[in-house]
C-alpha cells in the first residue's frame, strides 16, 4: 500500500538513502533473527511497558521498516501496520513476513503525514529511532496523537542531542561537542560512524522539542529510559567506549490523553488532561 504523501527534497533524499542502504545491506537493514522471535515481547519490551500481552492489539510500527520491528510485534500476536518512507525497507518486511508466515500491513508514507489512517485507529504506536530524519518534530507528534486512540500508548526512541553534537572520535580530552545545540539545517555529512547513518540527512532536536513536544501534542510521559550501550572494556573510539561518556539514545513511554476502556488484560477508566 502506498500513500499520496507530499514529497520534499529532504523526504526524497532520505527515501533514496534508505533504499540504497537496503541494497548495500548496511546497518539497521537486517531482518529479525530466529532468537528474536522465540520470546518476542522479551526482545522488544524487557522493561514491561506493554503489559505482557499485546495479542489482537492494533499496533503501528512507525518509520520502522526493515523486516525486524513489525515482525517481532506480529509474532507477539499484535495486529501490525508498518509505515516507512522506503519501499525497499517495506519490501524486507513483506519478504520476511512471507518466510515466517506472519501477517502485517505495510504503508509507504512519511511519519509526519498519514492521512490514510483514521483518528484513533491504533491502540499502540511503536516508534524506533527516526525523528532525526525530519527537520521539524512537532508535525510528527501531531500525527501520532491523531492516529492514537485516547489512552493509547506511544513508545518512541530518539537520538540524544548531545550524541549528535559530539565528535565520533575522542580528542586528548575526550569526546568534544562540535555542533551547536541551537542550530538549523541538517548535520554535516558523516562517514564511518555507528552513531549516525551515512548518506542520510539528519537533524538535531533539542530536549524541549523531544520531550516537550510529546506533551504539547497531548501525551502524558509515564516513563523514560536510556538504553545501555556503554562498555568500559571496549576500544577507544568504539561505539561502546563513546557510549560510556555520550549516551546515544533515549526511550520514552507516553500515553494519549483522554479516556481508555482497556489496558492490557484489565479494564480501566482513566482521564488524562493534556
Image (cartoon, grey):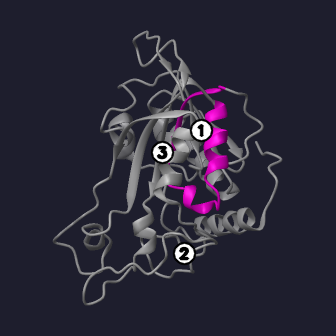
Q: Is residue 27 above or below residue 140?
A: below
Stretch in magenta: 120-147
Q: Residue at x 55, y 46 (%)?
A: 213
Q: Nearer the viewer, residue 61 or 112?
A: 112
Q: Which mark is residue 198?
A: 2
Q: Is residue 230 above or below residue 221?
A: below
Q: Nearer the viewer, residue 239 or 186?
A: 186
Q: Nearer the viewer, mark 3 or mark 2?
A: 3
Whether residue 91 sits left or right of residue 74 in the image: it is right
Q: Nearer the viewer, mark 1 or mark 2?
A: 1
Q: Which mark is first along the chain, 2 or 1?
A: 2
Determine contact: label 3, label 2, CB under 8 Å. Answer: no
Location of residue 175 by image quarter: bottom left
Q: Residue at x 80, y 58 (%)?
A: 7
In this figure, which residue is indicated by the disc labeled 3?
A: 156
* C-alpha distance separating marks 1 and 3: 14 Å
* C-alpha distance separating marks 1 and 2: 31 Å
Q: Position of residue 209 (x, y in %)?
A: 53, 53
Question: Which residue sits furthest left?
Answer: 233
Q: Residues within 10 Å of mark 3 (few under 14, many from 20)?
A: many
Look at the numbered disc 1 and give the secondary structure of its residue: loop
Q: Position of residue 239 (x, y in %)?
A: 32, 71
Q: Is residue 209 above or below residue 200?
A: above
Q: Position of residue 183 (x, y in %)?
A: 57, 71
Q: Which mark is first along the chain, 3 or 1?
A: 3
Amino acid at each position: 500500500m502506498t500513500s499520496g504523501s507530499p514529497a520534499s527534497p529532504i523526504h526524497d533524499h532520505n527515501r533514496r538513502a534508505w533504499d540504497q542502504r537496503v541494497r548495500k545491506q548496511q546497518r539497521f537493514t537486517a531482518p529479525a533473527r530466529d532468537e528474536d522471535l522465540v520470546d518476542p515481547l522479551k526482545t522488544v519490551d524487557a522493561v514491561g511497558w506493554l503489559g505482557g500481552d499485546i495479542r489482537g492489539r492494533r499496533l503501528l510500527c512507525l518509520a520502522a521498516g526493515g523486516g525486524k520491528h513489525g515482525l517481532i510485534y506480529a509474532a507477539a500476536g499484535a495486529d501490525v501496520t508498518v509505515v516507512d518512507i522506503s519501499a525497499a525497507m517495506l519490501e524486507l518486511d513483506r519478504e520476511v513476513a512471507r518466510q515466517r508466515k506472519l501477517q502485517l500491513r505495510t504503508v509507504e508514507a512519511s511519519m509526519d503525514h498519514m492521512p490514510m489512517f483514521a483518528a484513533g485507529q491504533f491502540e499502540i504506536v511503536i516508534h524506533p529511532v527516526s525523528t532525526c530524519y525530519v527537520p521539524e518534530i512537532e508535525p510528527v507528534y501531531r500525527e501520532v496523537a491523531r492516529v492514537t486512540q485516547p489512552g493509547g500508548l506511544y513508545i518512541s526512541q530518539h537520538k540524544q542531542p548531545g550524541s549528535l553534537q559530539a565528535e565520533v572520535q575522542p580528542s586528548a580530552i575526550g569526546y568534544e561537542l562540535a555542533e551547536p545545540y541551537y542550530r538549523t539545517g541538517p548535520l554535516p555529512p558523516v562517514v564511518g560512524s555507528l552513531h549516525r547513518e551515512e548518506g542520510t540527512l539528519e537533524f538535531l532536536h533539542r530536549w524541549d522539542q523531544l520531550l516537550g513536544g510529546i506533551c504539547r501534542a497531548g501525551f502524558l510521559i509515564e516513563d523514560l529510559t536510556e538504553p545501555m550501550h556503554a562498555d568500559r572494556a571496549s576500544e577507544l573510539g568504539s561505539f561502546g567506549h563513546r557510549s560510556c561518556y555520550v549516551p546515544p539514545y533515549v526511550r520514552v513511554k507516553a500515553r494519549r490523553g483522554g479516556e481508555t476502556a482497556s489496558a492490557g488484560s484489565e479494564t480501566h477508566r482513566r482521564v488524562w488532561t493534556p
